[in-house]
Structure formats: structure tokens, C-alpha cells
Image: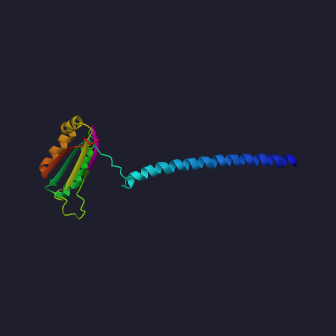
């Protein structure tokens, strides 16, 4: 009987060791998940740590605002921008959309589509302007816009 009691005690300590390892492994996995998800969550909340600046999307920033002859064509223009312009080599950031009505009378809302594309260097911007997809989009939409306003902004801030 004594041998049996010793065997059970050894077996119980082995089970306890395995259980402790499993618990430790589970805790390590949970800690990694919490740290990882915490980093992802921080990027989606829209808040930054005190004193931190948001990342700059690009050094060269090209913005265009379109007033269309037919405002109902805005979704088609946005889809063309998504398909043709966002995929041009050298583009590092991109957005196309419609005006956000935020109830601010000082914000210019006299456009149908706003477009933004960013580049790291001027050479990428120059290649973008001459790229067949850009030429195709401009040729398709030029007759369909009432006007276009284009702004190019460089951000050389360190």
C-alpha cells in the first residue's frame, strides 16, 4: 500500500507540474494577445498618447476636388479613382470620397468628390501624372466635371 501511495503522490506531482506548465503557457499566450490587441486597438480609437503627433501620410500630397455636372455620378468617379489611381506604382497613401456635412459653415462644401493621393518623392508624383491610368481617368472625367481644384502640398517637416 505504501508503494501505491508513493506512486499516486508522484503521479499527482507530475500532473501538477503539467498543469502549472499549461497554466503558464496559457497566461503567456493571453499576455501576448492582450499586448498585441492593445496595440491594434490604439490605432483604431483615433486617440494618441499625450504629446504624440499623428503619422504623416506622405511627403508629397496631391488633392483634387471635383464639382461634377451630374452630382449623381460621384460614386462612379470614386470607383474609378479606387480602381485606376490608387493602384499606380509610387502611391503611398490614398483616399477618395464625398463631402462630410459636419454643420460647420466655414467648411467649403461646394464639391462632389474629394480625392487625395500621397507620394514619398517628387519622381513618383511625376510618374503618376504620366501614368496611363491617370491619363485615362482624366480623359474620361474631364468632360463630366464642371470644375476641378487641385492642390499640391509638400511636407518636409521632420
Q: Provide the major secondary structure of the magenta segment.
A: strand
Q: Is residue 84 above or below residue 102?
A: above
Residue positioned 47% across, 48% down in the render: 36
Which of the 4 image quarters holds residue 118?
Answer: top left
- Residue 58 image offset from top left, x and y in percent: 28, 43
Q: Quadrant of the C terminus?
A: top left
- Residue 112 image offset from top left, x and y in percent: 19, 56
Residue positioned 61% across, 47% down in the render: 24
Q: Which residues are magenta?
A: 89-95
Q: Nearer the viewer, residue 30 or 91?
A: 30
Residue positioned 42% across, 53% down in the render: 41
- Residue 91 image offset from top left, x and y in percent: 27, 40
Which of the 4 image quarters holds residue 98?
Answer: bottom left
Residue 52 on the magenta span = no
128 to the left or right of 20: left
User: What colouring method underlies this structural image?
Assistant: rainbow
Furthest residue to the bottom?
A: 103
Furthest residue to the right?
A: 1
Q: Nearer the viewer, residue 158 or 61?
A: 158
Q: Is residue 126 above or below residue 4?
A: above
Residue 92 on the magenta span = yes
127 to the left or right of 57: left
Residue positioned 24% across, 54% down in the render: 75
98 to the left or right of 146: right
Amino acid at each position: 500500500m505504501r508503494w501505491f501511495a508513493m506512486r499516486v503522490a508522484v503521479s499527482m506531482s507530475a500532473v501538477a507540474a503539467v498543469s502549472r506548465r499549461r497554466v503558464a503557457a496559457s497566461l503567456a499566450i493571453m499576455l501576448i494577445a492582450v499586448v498585441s490587441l492593445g496595440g491594434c486597438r490604439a490605432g483604431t480609437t483615433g486617440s494618441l498618447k499625450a504629446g504624440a503627433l499623428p503619422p504623416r501620410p506622405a511627403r508629397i500630397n496631391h488633392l483634387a476636388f471635383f464639382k461634377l455636372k451630374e452630382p449623381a455620378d460621384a460614386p462612379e468617379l470614386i470607383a474609378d479613382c479606387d480602381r485606376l489611381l490608387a493602384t499606380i506604382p509610387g502611391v503611398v497613401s490614398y483616399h477618395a470620397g464625398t463631402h462630410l456635412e459636419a454643420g460647420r459653415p466655414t467648411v467649403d462644401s461646394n464639391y462632389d468628390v474629394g480625392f487625395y493621393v500621397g507620394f514619398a518623392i517628387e519622381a513618383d508624383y511625376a510618374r503618376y501624372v504620366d501614368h496611363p491610368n491617370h491619363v485615362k481617368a482624366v480623359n474620361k472625367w474631364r468632360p463630366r466635371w464642371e470644375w476641378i481644384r487641385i492642390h499640391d502640398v509638400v511636407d518636409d517637416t521632420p
